[in-house]
Amino acid sequence: DAAEGNRDATDADWLQRPLSDLIQHILDVHHVSNRAALARLRPLAKTVLAAHRDKHPELERVAALFEAMDDDLIAHLRKEELVLFPFIRDLETLGWGASSPVGPITTPLAIMDEDHDMFGGLLRNLRHATGDYVVPSDGSADFRTFYEGLEVLEGDLHRHIHLETNLLFPAALELAA
């Protein structure tokens, strides 16, 4: 599971606010930063691999893991934006009368939880493949920027997943009960 740690002080604040506020925060902060990070990292991944693959064959695995993360994360964000978040907003305003083409809230939440677990595995594998994002001594500025960007994306994604898995999803289940 990619959600790190226990609840922090800001989590208590989210628990006192409407779920639509938390959803908007996730959209405005995490979805925006995740997409921006992926857009910055895509060309860097190609540049770093092309420039350093001969001396650093581990970059083949790093690039493959990043590509998987990129593809899966974009699809995940769309599912949240088009299906899950509108459903939770409807639950909040309509109560148990809210309906969804995907069935009960437990269905999309189970899919999102599976995605979150998969992202946790990808992040662990990326951290391992990069040696904890340590740039080799012969690494270029692009190499350094790529690894730094991966590490920032990892931290942001952990926070994003934490907010959903530990705050939003349980509260949505409670609304649906």
Image (tube, helix red, strand yellow):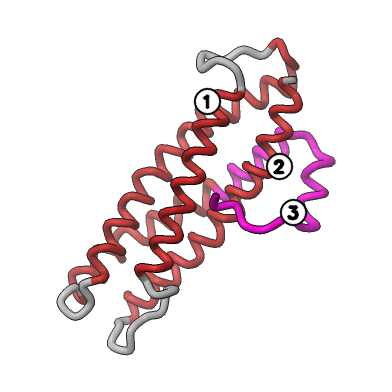
Q: Which mark is residue 7?
A: 3
| Residue sitting at x 33%, y 76% | 143
Instruction: Describe the element under mark 2 as helix, strand or loop.
Output: helix
Tell me: 121 left or right of 48: right
| Residue sitting at x 23%, y 77% | 56
Which contiguous range is marked in magenta? 1-30
User: Can you identify the residue that label 1 sits on?
Assistant: 83
| Residue sitting at x 75%, y 16% | 95
Of the image marks 3 and 1, the number of the one nearer the N terminus: 3
Mark 2 residue type: Leu
Q: Residue furthest bottom?
A: 137
In the displayed structure, 103 sits above or below 106; it is above
User: Can you identify the residue that label 2 sits on?
Assistant: 167
Of 108 and 88, which appears nearest the observer?
Answer: 108
Instruction: Describe the element under mark 1 as helix, strand or loop.
Output: helix
Tell me: 7 left or right of 35: right
